[in-house]
Amino acid sequence: MEKQSYIKTQTVIVGSGVAGLFTALCLPEDMEILIITKENLKDADSYLAQGGVCVLKSVDDFSCYYEDTMKAGHYENNPDAVRVMIESSPDIIGTLVELGVKFDTEDGGEFDYTREGAHRQNRILHYKDETGKQITDALLSVARSRRNITFVTQTTMIDFIECDNTCYGIVCEDEYGEMGAILANDIVLATGGIGGLFLNSTNFPHITGDSFALSLKHGVELQDMNYIQIHPTTLYSKKKGRRFLISESVRGEGAILLNENGERFTDELQPRDVVTNAIVEEMKKFGTDHVYLTLPNMTSEEAAKRFPNIFEACKEEGYDITKDKVPVTPAQHYMMGGVKTDINGATSMKHLYAVGETACNGVHGKNRLASNSLLESLVFAKRAADLIANDKDEKGDDFPDVDLKAYPNKYEIQKEFKALIMDEIKRKDEAFYDKWCDNEN
């Protein structure tokens, strides 16, 4: 491919979820930005986030919030990242409100804060049971109105363009199988996690860890690739496809877990990994592949108002969550590890950044605290944008040629990517691999 045929922009962002969109919106409005996404704009896991987004309500809650995050992460968290996330949260929420994001309020107009597992205080803002959709829709609406932001859908990143540990751009394949190269001053990875590699996952099936595979190929540092969160409660089904998440906020509002004998067997508000392990033990004990969830302290009308999508999804399967025992089972949910970054989103490769679930700055440790994911994405996306905006480093034009004919099609590339990622997970933690990854897609 002739170099004059490369597409050129100032910043290219790979991914159209909360992290990618907020990065774009926090960059200067006179900067040319190209956002590419693998499927359609709304096919991002951010849209599926039900529970909410955490916020530091007052300085009095800092120590408690900090300790809750650290304890959930088994104290393997990066303390600086945790501090930055919590301290930044009020400003981030203020920015979201300015951009048009709505949160549920009490009758007096004050924010309605809820609580989820491993939180000792009510500090989670929410919009019904579709907080991620509310935030992403608002950000997307603003981004679409910005003249400096261009979107390209149905386009898959298949390689980095790099030389001497400096990233110059990416190679992509569009929906028609046409390949091309995009050059940019700065490249931001916001491709989400790895749920599409698992048979049972709450993620969209096209979220397959492409950024991780390319990092392995190009020597970009990764961190904690075996730290993969299994969510304890997804709606049990024998159907193939994405698993429907029953948010932790349902347990935060009083839902309980029951075994095959109808007995409660755990404290539902423990960290996710603890609840997941309790469910697995109960399934082993009874030889089943699910347990049950019920919400006895709400009426049907109350549950339909507070959790409209969850209530409806259960009804479609024949269950009233307030009266019936709804079968639930654990499924892959979230990646705590990923492309290693500092607290500004910078990776080990120059001019390459990672944000959101793709990045690992250590904020989550070994196990993510509920409703920290949206906040983490937003806080560190802004910090990455600020760093990029102030970057005066000139890379020059000494970048490598791209031979597009040397690449197999994206389906062959996806097989290679999957093998790279799964081998790395197995290398890091064979016991986890054997327990959760031996039935991947």
Image: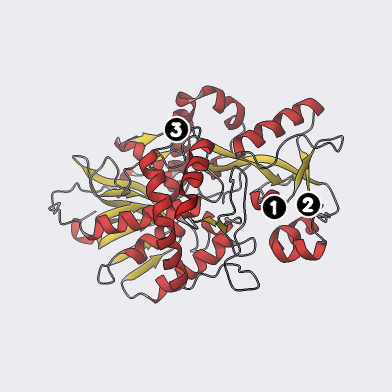
Taking the image as drawn, is residue 252 in sight?
yes
Give the class, few, some or many, for how many residues have Cα within 10 Å of label 1's Cα (few <14, many ≥20). Answer: many
- Residue at (15, 57) in percent of width and height: 392
- Colour scheme of the picture: secondary structure
Q: Residues within 10 Å of mark 3 (few under 14, many from 20)?
A: some
Q: Mark 3 points at which residue?
A: 76
Q: Is residue 144 left or right of residue 331?
A: left
Pick whichever, 186 or 97, lies toward us.
97
> Please, what secondary structure does the residue beneath circle 1 have?
helix
Amino acid marked by disc 1: Val
State the separation of the CA atoms marked 1 and 3: 27 Å
Work out whether residue 83 or residue 98 is closer to the camera in this orientation and state it.
83
Question: Can you identify the residue that label 2 sits on?
Answer: 295
How many labels were placed on the picture?
A: 3
Q: Say which amino acid is labelled 2.
A: Leu
Residue 108 x %, y %:
62, 73
In the picture, residue 327 is in which quadrant?
top right
Q: Mark 3 and mark 1 in contact (Cβ < 8 Å)?
A: no
Kindly check if marks 3 and 2 are in contact, taking CB atoms under 8 A apart as contact: no
State how far apart marks 2 and 1 are (Cα).
8 Å
Return the residue at label 1.
250
Pointers 2 and 1 in contact (CB under 8 A)? Answer: yes
